[in-house]
Structures are given as C-alpha cells and as structure tokens.
Amino acid sequence: MLSEAVWGLPGPSSFVDAITADAARGLHTVAVLPRRMLVSPDTVNELAGVLTTAMIQRDLICERVFPDCQQPLLPALGQQLCFSTALSLPLQDLIRHPDVHGRVIVVSVSDLAPDQVGALPDLVRRLVEVSRPLAPSDRVTFAFIAGREAVAALEGGATADVWLASHWWWNRVTRWDSGAHVARVSPASHHSLPAEVRAEVIVEVARWDLELAEHLVRTWNGEDAELQRHVKEWWSSGIFGVEELKSARVGVSPPAHLAGSWDAGHIDVWHGDICVAAGCLLTEPDWEQLLWRAQARVLLPWIDLRRAELHGALVQRLGPRWRAAVEMLDEQPGVGDVLEVGQLAHIARVRLGGADPLLTGCANELARVRNEMAHLRPVTFDDLERLLRSCRVLQRRP
C-alpha cells in the first residue's frame, strides 16, 4: 500500500493535477494504473480520495460513487446518479439527465464487481461516442480509475478522443520523488553518512516503486545480503524479453509489447529511459554496480570534502616541511592542481608515520575507500563506520 503522503510528491501530484485539469475542461478521464497498483484497494482508495478532494478544491461538483455490485454496470451507475429515475435509462440519456449536469463522478474499478469491470471498456467507448454532440455543461463528466483494459477498445488507446483523456501511471516517478519519499518515511535522527548512503541505496534499488522504498526503510538493517534477500522476496518473478527494451521508445504510455511487464511493475521510465526494475536482474555484477552507483553519489563528494580538510591538516602539521614533501612525490602537481587523496596519504605515511598515527590513519583510510570506489567496487557499511571514525581527527583540528 502506498501511503497518502505519496500523492503530495511532485511526480504523483502532477498526475492528479493533470486529471483534475482535464475534468475541469469537461473531458472524461481514465487514470490508467498498472495491475500491481490496482490489486491494492487501499492504494486505489487513496487516489480516489485525493482526486475527489482536488476537484472539489477547484470548485467542481464532484463525488465518488459506489455502484451496486449486484447489478449490471450501467443500471448500477444510473441508480447512483439519478435516484428518482428508472434504472433502464440508456447511456445517452443518463449522461444528460438534469440531475447530473456539470457534475464530475469518480468511479474506481476497486468498487466494481468482476462482471462490471469487464463491461467497463465498452462503457468507456460508448461514453465517448454519446458525449461528442453535447457541451460539457449539459452532461456529466466521469473520472475512472482503471487498468489499461478500460481504454483498450478505443481507437488510439492512450489519447483516443477530444472528449476523453487517459492518464497513464507511466514515467511519473523521478529520483527526486523517490528520494523525498525515503527521507520522509525515514527516522528523523538518521542524518549520518551511513544513513545517507543507505537512503541512496534504497532509492537506487526501489527506483519508481515507492511502496518497495517504504518497505526497505522499515525492514532493511543495512547489510548487503539482507538487502538482496528483501528485494528477491519482493520480486518473486522475473521479466522476459528484456532485450526488447533497447528498441522501445518513451511515450505517454508503455509500449504495447511491454504492457504486461508494466502491469506487473517490472518496467517503467527511469532517468529518461525505459528500465527494468532493479529486483528483476539480480546477477552479482549487476548488483555490485547498482550498489556502487548509489554509494558514489554520496561518498565521492564526501571524500573530496575530507580530502580538502586533510590537505589543510597536513600543511599545518608539517609546516615548512610541506613544500619538500610535495616535491618528493613521483608525480609532481602543476600550478593550481589539487593533490589527490592517494598523494596525501603517501605524504602522511612518509613524513608523519608514527609521529601522528591518527592523522596518518585518517589519510590511509580515505585513500583506501577512494581507491575501492575508483575501481567501481562498493564498500561495506563496516567500511563506512571505520572511515567515519578515522576522519574524526579532522574535526579536532583548528
């Protein structure tokens, strides 16, 4: 289940805003969700509530209806919309009944019986046809929350008619959304370097799957092996035809030949390209590269800040001996060049050694971790803790 806070993130909120704006223009809308989201009634209920609230805030007369599951879809909707009217009204008369003029009606497949869900595609198709000759002010406007089957009968599918707009839950979640959500549901006290790396790893692993991100925040203890176990359990099945992604283009909806994979939550758009969920390709090299990418986003800038502090500490500690120490390096820096961590560690070992074991140990640990990252090898959380302890000496220096 996605928490209610998800719909306040930039990507998801733009999804809600686009649907609301089209409804305000009098367009029927279909919020097309993947099956993986539709099977969670709580998630769909949250979206229905957010949509209804957003439309009311735009001064639209909007309500969510709950059709009688014992009746066919059209009579059940008629009963909800026109209490005083016979249930046998044809669709063209129902949508322009005086009781429903100017109203927006939210209908979710989570509130329908299986037979009613099966009848929805034909209802949507007919709704488009009978709405064409009518002004929006002279009829009701529907906002459906459904799967891709709801628009399958429409010619053109994704953007089928001037009076209907379908909005797909596709390319809606960015790294910023995922990162913000992880930060929001994480304990407020977790602002250490390991906590930041852990959060970035969760974003890299979960990608657009905000529910998985929230699950990992609650359950993952920080160990790599445990993370793999959690992800493998979450993604119990893999994906076929991954090679087809290479020729697929990003559009307003998932490519038709990959729609089933999108339904299962296995693919979406990430960093502008169609990608497979990280949990579907858990080979060891892929996993190491995934962890490295996440760690590099946090660790490399952090190490560079510590490098600058180490440089200043060594200059201060060596005093007049600093220039001679630099001149003895195998590779002489040019004017304005920055000394790398490895060069600083060499100076510390040769010029200080046991005379300042804490500063020398800090330089060595920074160089070791930076070397691991340079060779595209992820580090462990024990490594991070050791690095933090070693670098505390830099905080004690004026």
Image (spheres, rainbow, N blue to C red):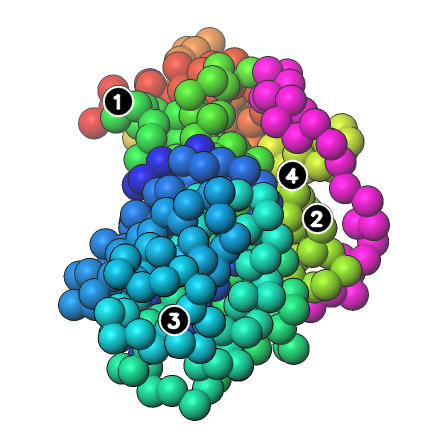
Using the numbered discs, state the Cα–Cα distance from disc 2 to disc 4 in whole angstroms. 13 Å
Using the numbered discs, state the Cα–Cα distance from disc 4 to disc 1 in whole angstroms. 28 Å
Using the numbered discs, state the Cα–Cα distance from disc 2 to disc 1 in whole angstroms. 38 Å
x, y percent for residue 4: 32, 40
Q: Nearer the viewer, residue 23 or 320?
A: 23
Closer to the observer: label 2 or label 1?
2
Q: Which residue type carries mark 4?
A: Ala
Closer to the observer: label 3 or label 2?
3
According to the image, label 3 marks what residue? 94
Q: With 172 as the anchor, is 237 left or right in this view?
A: right
Neighbor class of circle 1 (other Cα within 10 Å; few <14, some 14-19, many 20+) is few
Q: Which residue type carries mark 3?
A: Leu
According to the image, label 4 marks what residue? 278
Reading the chain from its start, which is encountered first: label 4 or label 1?
A: 1
Closer to the observer: label 2 or label 4?
2
Which stretch is magenta?
Answer: 225-253
